[in-house]
Amino acid sequence: MRRAGGRRHTLRDIAAALNLSVNTVSRALSGKDGIGEKTRALVRAEAERVGYVPNSMARSLVTGSAMTFGLVITNPSNPFYAQLISSIELRARAHDYSLLLTVTDESEENEARAAESLLRSSVSGAIVVPVQASADPWRRLGAVGVPTVLLNRDLPDLGYRFVGTDNELGGYRATAHAISRGARSIVVLEEDLPITTIADRIAGYRRAMTEAGLAMPRGSVMRVPTRRHDQAALPWQPQQAYQVARRMLRRARLPDAVVVGNDYFALGLYRALAEHGLKVPDDLMVIGFGDHPFSAFLSPSLTTVRLPAEEVGEIAADLLLEEIAGGRSARPLKQLIAPTLVERDSTAGAPRAGRCEASPA
């Protein structure tokens, strides 16, 4: 509802109608302490009656910020980030913040532009998945007092709060599961991208293999060429994983299991295996990473590592809110959230003893 002349109702209008101060009305509507429940109810009822809408621009002039979270991610099509964005947005909205989303496409140049954009937009704080080529863009935010939380990929030199998936544990659990099913030779298909999430998964694989006393000959980690720099909307290409899998199948002997860095790679691997007349899990077990929506519907359904996207997003938003408020958090500076292994048919049953020989390409 608007007043005569088309002007929107303001806090001052509500205060005048109830014979209260503007400060009291503001505190009542924002849920601040020190306001009685009767007064709070009266203010909210009057605000609803006149159709009061908060003026975020006016509030930003008072607070010096735009009541906005800046969220910087590397690519928008990753299902993990889709869940993450939703989780952060819900937390932000509950505290009257909006969300400003920026995508870097794994580009240093885009990352520098993103940091500059957040500074110009006067965001209240930032949640950032860094490219990890340089810490400089995000060091600048901290230097001018913009609270910043790093997500999924850390920049330890900055000393910022960080929350992410424990990818090392995920790689370990995936590999240890294959070993528990009888696998003795295990190959990893991972994206060829120099980021800590990938390095950590490979480290987890190596830890599990070392603990089991199993060999990791040259070629145990096979790199899938990345397409992210060219087309961020399609960050993972089953076609690329398919080509790498075909090279693997030219070897004299198949591995017992393959751990793929994301479930999209499993699509390419499944096709290559089918073309060679090989069956999952009878001839070769497959374990994915991500638990994407299609993974349960593959044939056979894919055993995979489920990532805690919702929990990571909620913690990141809460950390940023604490940073903005200027309070000291009891939470640790760095938090890693454990992923979950989801067992399905691609690792069901014990593998055939000795494994079959690879079919000719």
Image: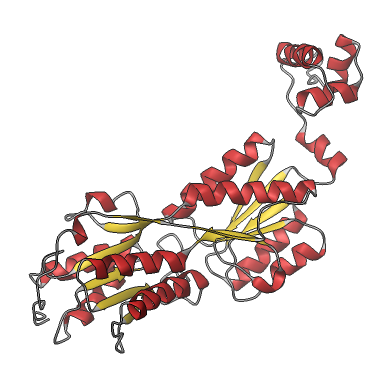
Q: Can you give x and y, in whole percent of width and height, for residue 193 in the image?
A: 46, 75
**137 vs 68: above or below:** below
Image side of residue 105 versus residue 30, left or right: left
Image quadrant holding the C terminus, namely bottom left
For residue 278, what is the image quadrant? bottom left
Furthest residue in direction bottom, as rendered = 218
Left or right, 132 with respect to 187, comes to: right
Q: Quadrant of the N terminus?
A: top right
Is residue 171 visible from the viewing direction of this image? Answer: yes
- The type of colouring in the image is secondary structure
Q: Please indicate whether residue 19 sits to the left or right of residue 177 in the image.
A: right
Q: Is residue 278 above or below residue 83?
A: below
Q: Can residue 231 be spotted in the picture? A: no
Q: Residue at x 81, y 65 (%)?
A: 143
Quadrant of the image occupied by residue 341: bottom left
- 116 lies left or right of 91: right
Residue at left offset 72%, top offset 62%? 116
Of residues 126 and 56, the one nearer the viewer is 126
Along the line of sight, the residue nearer the viewer: 63 or 229: 63
Number of marks in the rendered image: 0
| Coordinates of residue 171 in the picture (x, y in percent) | 39, 68
- Residue 302, percent from left and from top: 25, 57
In the image, residue 110 lies at what x, y percent?
61, 67
